[in-house]
Amino acid sequence: MMRRADSLFARLFGLLLLAIVLAHVLAFVWFSQYGHRPPPPHSQPHTNGLPVGQPPPPPPGFGGPLVPLMFQLLTLIIAAWYGARLLSRPIQHLAEAAEQLSNDLDSPPLAETGPRESRLAAHAFNQMQQRIRQQVQQRGRMLAAVSHDLRTPLARLKLRVEEVPDAQLRARMGQDLGEMISMLDATLNYLHEQRSCEALQWLDLQALVESMAEDAQDRGADVHVSGYCAPLRVQPLALRSCLSNLLENALRYAGSAQIELRDSREQVEVRVCDHGPGIAPEQREAVFEAFFRIEGSRNRNSGGVGLGLTIAREAARRQGGDIHLEQTPGGGLTAVLCLPRQPPV
């Protein structure tokens, strides 16, 4: 019985019942004070239903039956507002906690207070958060173990391949081992990017892009930067990883790149253009899937493992932005990174 009385249904029902009773009590008091009174059984001569010489009762402060009706309406409105607030408050707290959890697995647990349903929902949510945190930690330990256990035999195989007398076979085996090591590194980097959480900070995006272009030029790459961009709030490490993948993708398939900055009040665009073989329109969304590689010029022979664009898009979306692909005028591919001026909290 006590559990039912502590439920949200019991609280709302009790509140509405109290409002109805209070509204009727107010109406009864008003009618008993100002309503029509029947004449006494042995009355004296009457004038308009009142004994002669008896003054009429004072009129009400507000005339007519609208007074009790307004009291009833006001009481029920207040009860409905408070009941709706009582009903929506636990749901709002749960939604805020879920949003915090999506941004940070180490966010504080939800307070287990309120009616029984709210406490049960908060307890279940906290248990879910704890299980997710444990699974992520377990996955991190597993990745570390896999990285260590796979790199050791791969390194031994690479040394033994050098002893193969057939040069052509040795070259093919070395290429396969190199691809396996590259896929392992890319996969671990991708999983690390997924579980990383970084605070928003003010960053001079133009200076970052120009620095990355100078580093590429020092390696002999043909990279040029144009346009202007004011500082904005971003996740610096995630944004650097995103731009690095877009730039390396353009250099890998085209050998050169043109980076264009476009600034506006709502968002910032970073356009990484190349004049390589390009991607067909029907495949421009599929290339963002993990390990997807198209046939043709942009394939595994170019050295990619199919994770660069995946990492770049996920890094952009963690900051409220996104990436899409366009055809470069004159041929090639343009990766457009859009970042909002006011990222989500």
Image (cartoon, grey):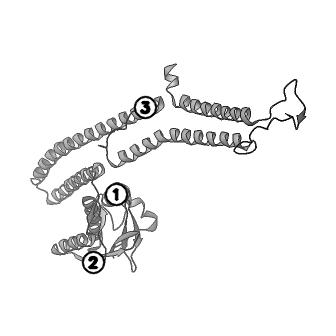
**First in sequence: mark 1 vs mark 2:** 2
Residue sitting at 42 percent across and 61 percent down?
285
Question: On residue 225, which mark appears?
Answer: 2
Q: Residue furthest right?
A: 45
Q: Which is nearer the eye, 10 or 125?
A: 10
Placement of 136 over or under 187, stated as above or below: above
**First in sequence: mark 3 vs mark 2:** 3
What's under tag 1, amino acid-wise? Answer: Thr
* Residue that label 1 marks: 310
* Residue that label 3 marks: 119
Q: Which is nearer the eye, 50 or 7?
A: 50
- Please identify the quadrant where the C terminus is shown: bottom left
Give the class, few, some or many, for how many residues have Cα within 10 Å of label 2's Cα (few <14, many ≥20).
some
State the separation of the CA atoms marked 3 and 2: 55 Å
Secondary structure category for the residue under label 2: strand
Q: Tell whether label 3 touches label 1 (CB within 8 Å).
A: no
